[in-house]
């Protein structure tokens, strides 16, 4: 004769077996139903196409604009070019040159009527070239002399458009040899 604990154990086992058989039968029926419904469908129709949808490998970038720029002289965009040129490296690597070239062609190509050929060997060359190009464009559009830059004064251009080295000295003066 079975004890009470043994009977409870048998009931638990039979309940588990019954539940498993019901779940197995439901899953088997679901799979058979899917097979019957999908027998006349193509593989692509059976699968969820949104999972396999690929995104385009390119992205459309918006044209670079500067707020408050006028359409004729485009002084703000020229100043942005001078600022980017002033923040360029003194001794760039080939990678830096390539990145700056892409940046210039993407952002500022519309400023030039002819093909743009920026000198990317140093910051001085690039800033002087950008300054001369700005002055030529403003002269061609008959702008006032106040808008023209003094391209010979490299230090003045760097102070006006470049990084603020005085602020950097305050923050990083403790680094030996950085500003000497």
Image (cartoon, grey):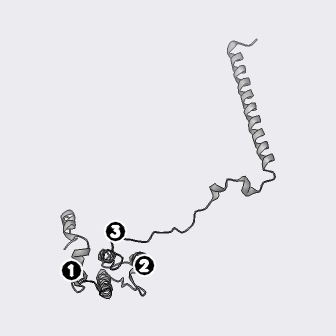
State the SS at label 1: helix
Reply above or below: 154 against 76: below
Q: Quadrant of the N terminus?
A: top right
Residue 126: where, in percent of width, then height?
Answer: 32, 82
- Left or right: residue 108 versus residue 51 is left
Would residue 175 be visible to someone looking at this image? no
Residue drawn 74% across and 24% down? 14
Q: Could you classify mark 2 by the number of other residues whose Cα lies within 10 Å: few (under 14), some (14-19), or many (20 or more)? A: some
Residue drawn 20% across and 79% down? 156
State if disc 1 and disc 3 touch (CB < 8 Å). no
State the SS at label 2: helix
Instruction: Find disc 2 in the rendering and name its residue.
Output: 105
Instruction: Find disc 1 in the rendering and name its residue.
Output: 155
Q: Nearer the viewer, mark 3 or mark 2?
A: 3
Instruction: Find disc 3 in the rendering and name its residue.
Output: 67
- Report, in whole angstroms, how far the alpha carbon at label 3 lies from the one at label 1: 27 Å
- Report, in whole angstroms, how far the alpha carbon at label 2 lies from the one at label 1: 26 Å
- Report, in whole angstroms, how far the alpha carbon at label 3 lies from the one at label 2: 19 Å
Q: Quadrant of the C terminus?
A: bottom left
């Amino acid at each position: 004769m079975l004890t009470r604990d043994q009977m409870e154990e048998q009931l638990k086992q039979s309940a588990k077996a019954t539940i498993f058989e019901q779940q197995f039968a439901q899953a088997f029926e679901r799979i058979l139903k899917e097979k019957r419904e999908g027998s006349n469908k193509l593989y692509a129709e059976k699968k969820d196409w949104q999972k396999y949808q690929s995104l385009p490998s390119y992205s459309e970038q918006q044209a670079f604009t500067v707020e408050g720029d006028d359409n004729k002289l485009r002084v703000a965009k020229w100043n942005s070019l001078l600022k980017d040129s002033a923040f360029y490296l003194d001794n760039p690597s080939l990678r830096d040159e390539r990145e700056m070239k892409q940046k210039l062609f993407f952002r500022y190509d519309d400023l030039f009527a002819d093909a743009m050929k920026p000198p990317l060997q140093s910051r001085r060359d690039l800033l002087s070239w950008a300054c001369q190009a700005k002055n030529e464009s403003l002269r061609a559009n008959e702008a006032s002399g106040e808008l023209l830059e003094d391209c010979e004064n490299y230090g003045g251009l760097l102070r006006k458009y470049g990084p603020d080295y005085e602020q950097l000295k305050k923050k990083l003066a403790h680094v030996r040899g950085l500003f000497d």
